[in-house]
Image (cartoon, rainbow, N blue to C red):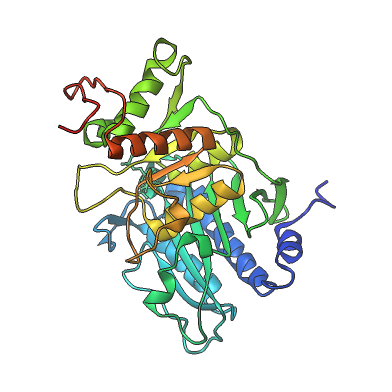
Amino acid sequence: MLFGRTTLSKFVIEHTRGQHSDMGALLIDVAAAVKGISALVGKGALSGFSGSAATTNVQGEEQKKIDVLANEAILRHCEWGGQLAGMASEEMDEPCPIPESYPRGRYLLVFDPLDGSSNSDVNVSVGTIFSILQRPQAGDATLADFLRPGAEQVAAGYAIYGPATMLVLSVRTGTHAFTLDRESGNFILTHPDIRVPEATREFAINTSNERFWEPPVQRYVAECKAGKTGVRGADFNMRWIASMVAEVHRILMRGGIFMYPKDSKDPSKPGRLRLLYEANPMAMLIEQAGGAASTGRERILDVAPEALHQRVPVILGSREEVERLERYHQEFDAGTDRPYASPLFAERSLFRD
Ligand code: AFP
């Protein structure tokens, strides 16, 4: 019944032919790791790996057992193939070299092995996010080799472990989604050439942080909440799953805007999400599908990384809404934004006081 449908292997061979024909094998290895993680996540409490690993990662965040296992799954499936010069992960302080016994290649794999894992114990969709860069010179990768702008990614993708397990991928030929057929074990192309609707009436943000946001974000969200009674003249809907993979997937499927903006809650962190293995791959997938991805002040894919686990504000999704928020940031920075009467702050004047 699925014969003749395009499998991931067929797609990858066809879309990486030529300059990156050697990347196909790496993508197939990533997909194999994802199938293993899907089986583990799908067992839930029966996996025997629920709960805390009683360790913390470089972010100072508690690691769950399943975080550690997902990380191991990707390392073990991808280290041997001969396509990689190194790997880096949210769960590891430093980049991971390829073991001496294995050949090296020209790619770097950067990943968040289980994004949204705080949801794994409450059975909400979680995912794996990955980004592939090219090593600038031969030999083992150095830390500096990983610190490349997202515009240099040669591939990006995520797996979402939901009611269905899906793999969403771009090799710079658009954004395409594959659904795991558990009977055959194949990922089948089910959503070719995804396009993000340019307009939307659905926003996603954690509004418990509202008092910590910058005024342009407060302005935008207040206007969405005002709906048809305010300047937008239309009602909006809100979502917050606290799993970036699930939010981005919804936006790819039906449009919307996702925001994890800069906030003043912890001045040492300009946002929660990490540039190299969350913001950059998601920004590539969204842009390849016709959407936009910004820090509010610059295109995410243009940000020059300074550290492996660097955080960045993230605003992505339907192009019209992202551009509106960028305009609000520009007006705020120029001191020309409309008087904005916030219930929390005194009315802003047109000019900086
Ligand atoms: P975890 O991987 O620690 O669950 O964090 C998930 C995440 O990085 C991202 O997937 C969510 O969009 C965001 O954090 C949710 O953050 P809040 O818990 O502050 O809403």
Residue at the bottom extreme, as displayed: 101
In terms of image quarters, where does ligand 1 lie?
top left
Residue 250 placement (x, y as % from top left): 54, 37
Residue at 33 percent across and 51 percent down: it is 51
Residue at 47 percent across and 42 percent down: it is 316
Q: Quadrant of residue 326?
A: top left
Quick check: 77 left or right of 203? right
Quick check: 115 left or right of 270? right
Residue at 36 percent across and 33 percent down: it is 328
The front one of 165 and 175 is 175
Residue at 83 percent across and 46 percent down: it is 1
- Is residue 193 visible in this depiction of the protein? yes
Q: Is residue 57 above or below residue 331?
A: below
The front one of 203 and 122 is 203
Q: Is residue 175 above or below residue 352?
A: below
Residue 92 placement (x, y as % from top left): 35, 68
